[in-house]
Amino acid sequence: MTQKKLAKEQNLVEVALLLKSYGAGLRRQNTDDGISDCDKDVCWFVEPALELQQIARQLHRLDEHGCNYGLTDTQETRRARLESKAQRLCTATPPNLIAYLVAYHQGDPRGCSLYIVPSEYLAKGRPVETVYDKGLAILD
């Protein structure tokens, strides 16, 4: 196994554990008794973690293209949709207003494009732009 692939798999587990600890990314599933919350085992958080890695990869490609050629209106819209989807995946079910996660898109193509920042780093009104590097980088 290559070192890059191993790093991505380790990152996937870290992302899943972070989502689990904040209750984010949980899906609801149908059961015979109606709709109930999924088991909060870490396996339920792997799918949203994989989605975040895919979003990070797509944002990184858009960042590279934007740096080299600029973005069209369609690409700008796509970037906004990807950022919104990443934030939805980081939102707890039900929402928690005390401890939460923020998905931050850092547009410089030389580094990671997507970070998950816990709310603890945003204390005292700090903008996410100043503390995103303390969060978890999503490897693309």
Image (tube, rainbow, N blue to C red):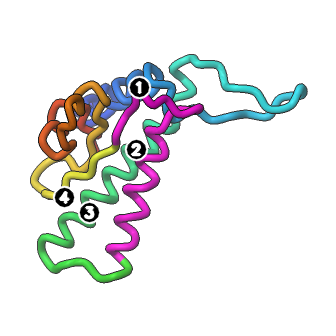
Question: Which residue position is annotated with label 3?
Answer: 61
The residues tagged by marks 4 and 3 sit, at their Cα atoms, a distance apart of 10 Å
Q: Tell whether label 4 touches label 1 (CB within 8 Å).
A: no
In the image, residue 63 sits, relative to residue 57, either above or below, namely below
Q: Which mark is residue 64?
A: none
Q: Is residue 28 left or right of residue 69?
A: right
- Left or right: residue 70 versus residue 43 is left
Q: Secondary structure at mark 2?
A: helix
Near-viewer residue (53 or 70): 70
Of tags 3 and 2, the one toward the viewer is 2
Amino acid under label 3? Answer: Arg
The mark closer to the camera, 4 or 2, is: 4
SS of the residue at dot 1?
Answer: loop
Q: Nearer the viewer, mark 1 or mark 3?
A: 1
Q: Quadrant of the N terminus?
A: top left
Determine whether, in the image, residue 15 is placed left or right of residue 25: left
- Sequence-earlier tag: 3 or 2: 2
Q: Is residue 35 above or below residue 56?
A: above
What amino acid type is highlighted by mark number 1? Ile
